[in-house]
Amino acid sequence: MAKLILSMDGLVLKEIPLVKDRMSIGRKAHNDVQIDNMAISGEHAAVVTILSDSFLEDLNSTNGTMVNGQPVKKHFLKDGDVIELGKYKMKYLTAALAATEPTGFTDGSSAEALAVADGRRVGSPPSATTTPGSAAPPPAAIMLLNGSNAGRELPLTKALTTLGRPGQVAVIARQPQGYFLTHVEGASFPVLNGKTLDAQAHRLDDHDVIELAGVKMEFFVKT
């Protein structure tokens, strides 16, 4: 299981297992990772994990989000990446590295969600995640069904393909087990085959119809 190692001024504060498909980071109490510091926006950023892959999304924060010293809006996380939020840093470790990385905690508290207030923390147990497999998925694409770009195909060749527009964003993850659609941002969730989805990742089947931000599109497997 991948995780984040939270630190401030070189002092490790907490390890944060990425046990949910989407973990929000911000100053407000409803976030999965609450950092009670005025340099952090109420809803600052989010880490979306789909099976074995994670990516970071800045949620239009006031002071921005950096990875390895560079400002980012969206970033596919790699082993050892360091996320910077004000004076706080979070090191991203995949499952293999997370098993051996020292954290400085021996009290069994790694299964907690985190709230930080100048070094203080509280938490509650989160839910479990899934385990990736090894098979390769077949080539696939989406076809736009309405609007000025109707009929246009978008091959799904990247690990993560972002769909939508600011205020309503989803992502399709290309995984060994297939293709998975996950809500990322916005109050309105994607609609799949006429049914509004929840925050969990949903596996796509051939000819599924996705509706997002006023755009209708069809997922299909190439043969």
Image: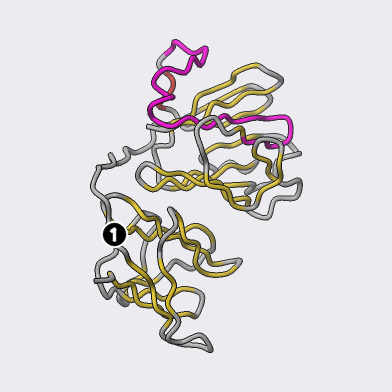
Residue toward you, 50 or 42: 50
Image point (67%, 34%), residue name: 36
Q: In the image, residue 184 lies at what x, y percent?
A: 49, 57
Q: Is residue 52 above or below residue 212?
A: above
Q: Is residue 81 above or below residue 73?
A: above
Q: In the image, residue 120 lies at what x, y percent?
A: 61, 22
Residue toward you, 163 or 184: 163
The magenta-colored residue range is 83-107
Q: Quadrant of residue 134?
A: top left
Residue 135 appears left or right of 194: left
Residue toward you, 163 or 85: 163
Residue 7 appears left or right of 48: right
Q: Is residue 167 above or below residue 180?
A: below
Q: In the image, residue 200 lies at what x, y percent?
A: 36, 54
Quadrant showing the N terminus: top left
Image point (55%, 43%), residue name: 31
Quadrant showing the C terminus: bottom left
How many numbered badges does the structure rendering display?
Answer: 1
Residue indicated by mark 1: 203
